[in-house]
Amino acid sequence: MLSIRLTRRGTHRRPFYRIVVTEKRSKRDGGFIEILGYRNPLTDPEQLVVKLDRVDYWMKCGAQPSDTVKSLIARARRAAEATAAPTPNA
């Protein structure tokens, strides 16, 4: 079974997270199939990049996102809609 979850990168006290597709039983920082994005909580504002088209593809293939990744995907979708929303002509 496939899972979409975070893997921790970076150094001690300087975390950096990747959003990856992996087998559910693999280790947290073990091998992965594809990198779908990343999250850097230390920048101001927090940096979040997600390839939403690839997330949709893997979810159609049966990959289950973790709770944290679900909320990050929702946040990325809201940000994408806000930037893509046309401005009304006044």
Image (tube, rainbow, N blue to C red):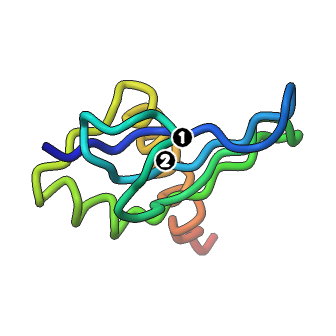
Q: x, y percentage for residue 68?
A: 45, 27
Q: Nearer the viewer, residue 77 or 64?
A: 64
Upstream in sequence: badge 2 or badge 1: 1
Q: x, y percentage for residue 14?
A: 85, 34
> Residue sitting at 34 percent across and 30 percent down?
66
The vertical placement of 80 against 64, above or below, is: below
Amino acid type at circle 1 is Thr
Residue 64 shown left or right of residue 74 in the figure: left
Read off the residue under disc 1. Answer: 7
The vertical placement of 13 against 33, above or below, is: above
Residue 87 shown left or right of residue 24 in the figure: right
Q: Nearer the viewer, residue 74 or 6?
A: 6
Amino acid type at circle 2 is Arg
Helix, strand or loop under label 1 = strand
> Residue sitting at 76 percent across and 40 percent down?
46
Helix, strand or loop under label 2 = helix
For label 2, count other residues whose C-alpha is less than 10 Å away and answer few (under 14), some (14-19) or many (20+): few
Q: x, y percentage for residue 48?
A: 64, 50
Dividing the image into 4 quarters, which one contains the C terminus? bottom right
Q: x, y percentage for residue 36?
A: 45, 60
Res 78 label = 2
Dividing the image into 4 quarters, which one contains the N terminus? top left
For label 1, count other residues whose C-alpha is less than 10 Å away and answer few (under 14), some (14-19) or many (20+): many
Residue 83 shown left or right of residue 50 in the figure: right
Distance (Cα) linking label 2 and label 1: 23 Å
